[in-house]
Image: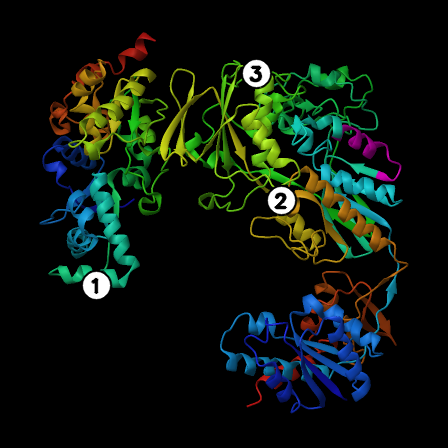
Amino acid sequence: MKIGVFVCHCGSNIEGTVDTKTVAEASLDFPEVTFATDTMYACSEPGQDGIIEAIEEHKLDGVVVASCTPRMHEPTFRKTLERAGLNPYMFEMANIREHVSWIGKDREANTNKAADLVRIAVEKLRRNQPLTPKEFDINRRVLVIGGGVAGIQAALDCAEAGLEVVMVERESTIGGKMAKLDKTFPTVDCSSCILGPRMVEIAQHPNITLYAYSEVESVSGYVGNFEVQVKKKATYVDWAKCTGCGECVEKCPSRKAPDPFNELLAPGRAINIPFPQAIPKKAYIQAEHCIKLTKDKCGNCAKVCPSDAINFEAKDEIITEEVGGIIAATGYDLFDWTVYEEYGGGRYPDVVTSLQYERMLSASGPTGGHVKRPSDGKEPKKVVFIQCVGSRDKSVGRPYCSGFCCMYTAKQAILTKDHIPDSESYVFYMDIRAPGKLYDEFTRRAMEEYGAQYIRGRVGMVYPDGEGQLVVRGADTLMGTQVEVKADLVVLAVGAEAAKNSPQLAEKLRISYDAYGFFMEGHPKLKPVETNTAGVYLAGACQGAKDIPASVGQGSAAAAKVIGLFSKEKLKSDPQTALVDIKRCIGCGKCAETCPFGAINMTEFRGQPKAEVLETVCQGCGLCAATCPQGAVQLKHFTDNQILAEVEALCRF
Amino acid sequence: MSKLSYAYYPGCSGQGTSMEYEMSTRALCEALDIDLKEIPDWSCCGSTPAHACDHVLSAALSGRNLGLAADMGEDCVLTPCPSCLTNLKNAGQHMSGSEEFKEKVNKLLDEPIGEIPDVKSVLQILFEDLGPKGVKEKVIKPLSGLKVVTYYGCILTRPPKLMEFDSEENPISMDRLMEAAGAKVLPFPLKTECCGASHGVARKDLVMKLSGKLLDMAEQLGADAVVTACPLCQMNLDLRQGQVNSANKTSHKLPVFYYTQLLGWALGLPQAQLGLDKLCVNPMPALRGIGKKEDAA
């Protein structure tokens, strides 16, 4: 074997603390290395051409590139080898950037470690076998999890491109957080007027199947061929019969049930249709509040339903859907602000969240769009907005900026003036973050045209003055003084956090999530909607708090990724899979039991039970190889011998 | 349950301005079968004057007492006074956290400290170790009908990382204990507001304003009494209530109890042990009203 070693400077990223020339020279002493050089940027066009030339000139049949992490450029260099006529798997990468130059400053030690890493790569490469991927069919259907604005956009774009779409929504209606908003910034156009038609399209599109009030139970399979179990939660209403007339809601005597769509501002009924434009516009029963289901009395809804749709015997149902790609668009939830005892911790009725205030402003909300404060139903004349509640606050474990609160607070200040012309608004802020198109102009409008008083400082305490008002005490850091404002209503600009159960869903999808539960994108800049799991994409606030335009943008981007994936004739499987040595296999079946992907079949060979790997299903995790008591299962490209050779290369003294 | 037993650091206020707090604390603990072992030859905790000038000196003053407590074989020191609590706890935490600091402190002490005991307020162990339930079992004269506001003051639960007790913004320990004794606890929003204590001498006008605000709010809520756990809070609200009244043109006559006095009353302890005669605003009208209002209602 003739091996070529290329040691990359990565500009000064590596060369700054590693003597790449010395590493290259040292490599020439390693077995079977016949060519070694340092190169400025191995991944650049001249860098890659240099590798191809060297392969041709020196008749190389294997290449080691010592540069960055294989997650960055392994695919790049494999293609380079292919262009030079070599098998792309006759390639190894030594990570001397993340593992060496970026983490140590001692040039001599770094140079030695880099040489060691190259030695390891060479020893592994000497034992590499050429591998060829297999091709497999794609199921051109896509699952969209979450029916908020990001999911709606993704689903419609996919459906318009001719793909079959399955949408799963946890609530009984799609629309997500946007459906709860009154108006949207910076244009102050009606939220449900722009979202409503898109929701209707979802319901009417022949390519879209919608499962509302449903959750993803489990996901198996792999890119191109996922199998998804969807749990349709019992609604106790046969949606095939329900016409959404609302008779049942009118007659339901259980009037203390929560109304989550109205952010618990007012009690709802046990049987409920969230709002007039709900999609699907179907009733569902909140079982724990239903008198019939809890005490076996009542049953009014069944009596009044003109279409005989009520079914108290209903059970959760599991449906299996097969798809080729998945878009997660599960959105966000509001931070539980009641940890802020200084704002009353939830004890004062006239301290409300921004989303509750949206419902108060909304014509379809519980007050019919008239702002009435919860305690006494009076119209507030002085409204104080407190920003950054659960954002940019390390003390409550939320150091990040939620990004959209500055904007919606400005919008709410403007709307307050529109609704109550003789009102005054005060906004306590830390910084105003309005870096979008027409955004800064919008916040200035709130201040200059609508007279909202912006006070730069945190609020330290909110308490009732005992005479019907709330005292809001904070700092004015520009004036360097303490301020107290007496308010009729306090609106907290509550920050965003990952949607409930995000980590659990991430684990079902086998994607990563960050410390706060937001899903991890493939690369923070270059792969914003991809994940590290092939075939799974992200859209909207599930990846991090973002506003409507950004969520919609990501919805379309994720759809484009799926359409791109499905435009291929067939997909190539990764050939780095497990392989059973049939001579050694004793047919114990342990590998089949441990395989999380169901990629091992037990078969018979000359009357003996044997394990067999389904190459297109195998993900190359190596669990079976570690489990096999006989060493009969080997992971191609990571065989026991290769790993031992690597260890020996390092521990040779 | 084995008998609760702690080393006890009374603090200087208890010898003078808050004698009734000291008396009632001891009487209450005895009645609740809690053993308070006074630290022999205890000395100043180094509170207000020392810690403003020199942290090591201040910690040494506290440290001497912590060392004496450790010598008694006790692993937890109790004090009724929040100011002592802050300084003792601060010294203990600072020394546990830094060997270097501990060495500096030990240089100033005749007997170097080894193990550093825990420090808690009497309120904390009543709430956490005995619990409101344990108090309730011993109540024989429930405070029914007595409407109180609980006032914790600024330092009893603050800073939260040092105190590690209750909520720094909305503490509830005294509320629960008073409820266990049968009182009605009103939702007092100014539980941890400043009474002006540290400006008590230099800026009396501030005390008038700040303590006045507390009394106004208590009165507005319809409280019969204020319950405190801090000698300085109690003094500002009780001793200075007349001054506050004349400065603000108000006519408050709100008795200001230590929570130990009211709990002791509910446990049926004799008045003499509770030091009720040491209070400035006459508590008797409020105490006599106990039980009656409920009958009327």
Stretch of the chain drawn in magenta: A195-208
Residues under numbered marks 2 and 3 in contact, where contact means CB atoms less than 8 Å apart: no
Magenta region, main secondary structure: helix
* Circle 2 Cα neighbour tier, 10 Å, few/some/many (<14 / 14–19 / ≥20): few
Q: Closer to the camera, A225 or A398?
A: A398
Report the residue at 52% width, 25% height from top: A452
Q: Say if B294 sits above or below B115 in the image.
A: above
Q: Nearer the observer, disc 1 or disc 2?
A: 1
Q: Which residue is mark 2?
A: A501
Q: Which mark is residue A484?
A: none
Is there any visible trace of residue B35 in the rendered image? yes
Q: Kindly report the distance in space between the C-alpha atoms of the residues bearing marks 1 and 3.
A: 65 Å
Tell me the element at label 1. Answer: helix
Residue type marked 3: Ile
Query: With A498 as the anchor, is B278 left or right in this view?
Result: left
3D distance between C-alphas at marks 1 and 2: 50 Å
The quadrant holding residue A182 is top right
Left or right: A575, with B154 as reference point: right
Residue A420 is situated, as x and y percent measured from the top left of the image, at 57, 16
The kind of residue on which mark 1 rests is Glu
Look at label 2 and name its amino acid: Asn
Label 1–label 3 contact, CB within 8 A: no
Residue B188 % position (x, y): 35, 24
Expressed as whole percent of the image width and height from the top left, the position of residue A81 reads 80, 76
Asked which secondary structure carries label 2, the reply is: loop
